Amino acid sequence: MLSTANAPRTAPAALIDALRQRFGDRLSTALAVREQHGRDESPFDVAPPDAVVFCESTQDVADAVTLAAAHRVPVIPFGVGSSLEGHLLAVQGGVSLDLSRMNRVLRAEPENLTATLQPGVTRSQLNREVKDLGLFFPIDPGADASLGGMCATRASGTNAVRYGTMRENVLALEVVTASGQVIRTGTQARKSSAGYDLTRLMVGSEGTLGVITEITLKLHPLPESLAAAVCFFPDIASAVATTIQIIQMGVPIARCELLDVNAVRAVNNHDKLGLREAPMLLMEFHGSEAGVAEQTATVQEIAKDHGGEDFQWATTPEERTRLWTARHHAYLSALQMRPGCRAVTTDTCVPIARLAEMVVAAEDEARASGLPYFIVGHVGDGNFHIAYLLDPSLPGERDLAESLNERVVRRALDVGGTCTGEHGIGLHKQGFLIEETGEGAVAMMRAVKRALDPDNILNPGKIFAL
């Protein structure tokens, strides 16, 4: 049965001894190591896990889970610690399984446009290793996350408007279940009608149904031509209206990212870009030279109609990298604008036609609150983030941020959107999950959890309100 509270389930001495006998110095109970594995980018403070096991193979994971299961002690998968919703926090104690050493690309098959790899491989590592094959993996959440973590949270990011999310790009998985059994889901075929789709069940399960130990992904050919551009707007509504029209006209834009004036100011300070401090779209176009030229001409006309001006183009790899590095630094850059702050971050996603009103309402409320904030978004697919920067020593600021966040989410749900476009539920959005899906759907999810993890040892306390 699922627990009704996050009561601690401390790893007993017998389990620690068994893990030490199996893993030797790859088991750590040192406080500094445990604290490193008990903190992510979320605003939550939770006691660290009781121990950390550094896994190097599927067998390591299976053995660690088997030993923990014998004592009904939680296991929490750990990639690089970049999650934003408390996914890796040991809310009931237990053992953190560090998968970062499982970092090999096992095989790349350019003829099939696939790669098979271990979960500790990061997206940048994979792209370095397949670049010479003329291929790339497009899912780019910004942080250099591990691909195992990206599967677990069903990540998306800047390229999702054209290439889809992890859901569309994962073909097959190897997974260790709650009993320590190793199973495989999916195949290298691009489609299948064979039974329940267990691959899609695991993608987005946030480590609550199994520990992912191997992944087969779709790769994509590197585009013949790439161009990136920035364009500035008089206000955030004009920038979002431009995005909506681009999508509605069917322009196959690869990336379309929004930065509000606060985010632009932050990346200017951090990366010395010298960008005009105004609401900005950062866009990228992929395809043939003729296709990219046609896309860019169309987008310039649309932007001009909405007050967009000062187009700046980046066609060399160095110029594009500089711009996208700044975008990826936006979160950390903004945190540095208020030293010592923590962030409460939204990631609502709404039907594209309702995006402008959602972003403007969020901006208006944040500005009126007086709380520092910034807005960025993968606006090409209706997904935006507003981050409220709060002083953790002032409880009133945390309460205010959560109140603002709740209003943003509730508006998104009212127009048929979702509380999370890419970060997942974790600890932060459990109440919203019930509102979004309904109690019946959540009851079905709980039934799946009970069937696959009857002792609730796999990342307990996540997704479901306890």
Image: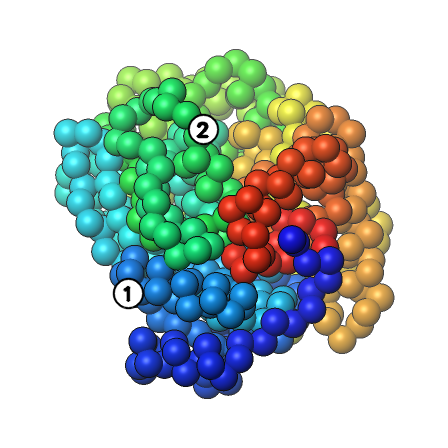
The residue that mark 2 highlights is: 196
Q: In front: 207, or 370?
A: 207
Q: Where residue 23 sits in the image (x, y, percent)?
A: 31, 76
Nearer to the camera, 247 or 170: 170
Query: Alpha carbon of mark 1 to alpha carbon of mark 2: how far?
Result: 30 Å
Secondary structure of the residue carrying numbered label 2: loop
Q: Is residue 39 above or below residue 403?
A: below
Q: In which quadrant is the C terminus drawn?
A: bottom right
The residue located at (66%, 21%) in the rendering is: 353
**Which residue corresponds to the image point at 63% horizontal and 49% vertical from the top-left?**
463
Is any part of residue 81 visible from this angle? no
Amino acid carrying label 1: it is Glu
x and y percentages locating residue 242 in the rendered image: 59, 25
- Mark 2 burial class by Cα count in 10 Å: few <14, some 14-19, many 20+: few
Q: Is residue 412 left or right of residue 154?
A: right
Q: Position of residue 161 (x, y in %)?
A: 47, 29
Give the mark nearest the N terminus, 1 or 2: 1
**Position above or below: 406 against 221:** below
Give the crowd class for mark 1: few <14, some 14-19, many >=20 residues within 10 Å: some
Q: Which mark is residue 56?
A: 1
Circle 1 — which element?
Answer: loop
